[in-house]
Image (spheres, helix red, strand yellow):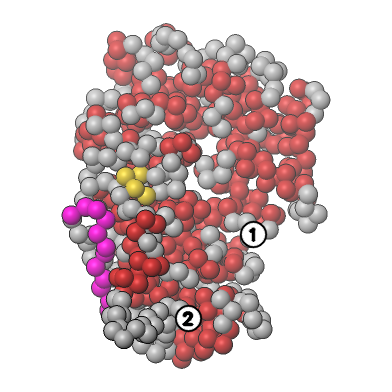
Amino acid sequence: MRTSRTRGALALALATAALAPAIAQDRPESLLPPGFGDPAPAPRATPRASGTPRPAPTVAPVPGAVPTAPSTAIVQPLPGEAPVATPSATPSPTPTPDAAELALYEMPLAARRSLALLGPAAERDGGVSAAAFEGADGRFVERLMRRVDAPLPSRWLSILLRRTLASRLTTPRGVNGADFAAERAWLLLRMGEAAAARAVVQGVDTADYTPKLYQVAMNALLATGDPAGLCPLAPGGLAATGERGWVLAGAMCAALAGDQREATRRIAVARRARVASGVDLSLARKVVGAGANGRSAVTIEWGDVVQLTAWRWGLATATGVEVPDTLYATAGAQVRWWQALSPQVPVGLRVAAAEGAAGQGVLSSAALVDLYGAVLDDDRAAAGDSAVAQDLRTAYADRTADGRLRAIRSLWGADAPWPRLVLTARAAARLPAGSATGADADRLVASMLSAGLDRSAARWRGAVSAGGDGWAMIALSDPDAIGNVGYAELSSYAGSGDARARQRLFFAGLAGLGRLSAEDVERGAEALDVRIGAVNSWTRALDRAAAAGEQGSVVVLAATGMQAAGWRGIAPEMLYRVLGALRAVGLGGEARMIAAEAIARG
């Protein structure tokens, strides 16, 4: 079910080793690059309970990583870190409160957030049901999440997976709530969803953080270019994980709090203790210099840097330092999508990354259009980007349908790449049905469906060629379709490109959506050699989750199954199983969009 792809697509925040060992160790690997000191065993910490009687597993050290325990000379309390109780003035002094009592003053029980229900997006806000993983074995779900080889070939499955992971979810049985949040955020980061990952980790009270969550939280905050977000976590993160990054975080946070003297002292101690060197230390000093009372200017030299890491990307972005394009090639595509989401990055640098992010589902069609709107107002924008923005405005605002269609064609170019179809989705929906024919009509339908505009696309049913791609996409996506597609219509579809491959995907889509009769399903499976009855461990797990109504488990299982370098690597049997399971748990709309996307991109 899996196909090979480059390791760069998985290299999120890795610095010294590949992601595979980290996955096997049930924790993400250290994000810090070489130069952070000699290895030493990190302190072990016991995760806090989450409402389930099963204790969370301890975190094993990762081979090849360098999460060493810093010298005690580096560990200094931040101002206000260790409050001291004032002695009572009464004749009979009361005992000094212990740490647990002091914690109640900082965070009363009524204000504590439960580990049993975590996530930023409630169902009314666009998330899935809180019970999406109810009844599932949390340990099994976590293992599945680690096996998802992001990015996925399907834009719509990626969008659905993001919605699921970012939803307010009940923690499944058998796992610690904070650890489950860490697994969700780690997968979101691998998908390029930095903002969603940050929201997930920040939904856990700092008192409930586990070593795994501390490490993923550092990645998430760096992926959003927010070193200040590390400040509430730095003392606990250093104690729980021993990661050298938390030592430098303490120095940066002292500067951001206005204590430049303490920040300078910590940087000096870190340098003497060889906590960091080279560009990693320079970037931390750059953040320190940007503090309230900072007076030092630090020049960042990238000449000797051969690997882009989350540490380097996050601190450079936070301080306005441009990362060389050559370094992006050393990391996964996800880092480019972090760039597309980052408001600190100038618009001109975000545009190219934003198109790829929109094609993957990290950005919506509307957000991509808004970004090009900002290009129109940017006097420093590149000529090519300005030309695209002008064409896009014409595609929306020209007085005639012919003028709008010409502008859309100009945006597509000769090959009509998928991100450009996403860009023109709403402009396509504004055209009158029948204003284009042939391949243009098919592309307009694909463009509308890339943004989920299914009823707008259905208006073109009578305008597209029977048996063509546009017709097939409408047959799969129309929410108001009545009755089944006949076997003769299935047989008449040829589409563009490899006719047999597309016909097999079309059949799998119709069968998975329940738009073929049982007799035609059997007949089509035999004629097209689509083995929809094949059974293996994945199909059994998917069937069990669908029968139990475990919406979240179905989505994660679908993601583990549909992993390939592109749509051509997705077997029609797998598409059939995924669509059927999604429909069974109430996700029929998403199933229709995935089926139509298979025709548009297969």
Which SS class for mark 1? loop
Q: Main secondary structure of the magenta part?
A: loop
Which residue is labeled 2 in the image? 79
In-front residue for pair 490/138:
138
- Judge whether residue 42 is colored magenta: yes
**Percent position of residue 598, x then y:** 46, 30
**Residue topped by disc 1:** 345
Contact flag, marks 2 and 1 (Cβ < 8 Å): no
Stretch of the chain drawn in magenta: 39-53
**Residue 268 horizontal/vertical position (percent):** 51, 89
Query: Is 444 in the magenta?
Result: no
Few, some or many residues within 10 Å of mark 2 (<14, 14–19, 20+): few
Residue type for callout 2: Pro
Q: Quadrant of residue 1?
A: top left
Q: Secondary structure at mark 2?
A: loop
Q: Is residue 73 above or below residue 452?
A: below
Please report the residue visible at 47 percent of the width from the left and 56 percent of the height from the top. Answer: 198
What is the spatial separation of the Cα atoms under label 2 and label 1, in whole angstroms? 32 Å
Residue 408 coordinates in the image, percent (x, y): 70, 31
Residue kind at label 1, given as amino acid type: Val
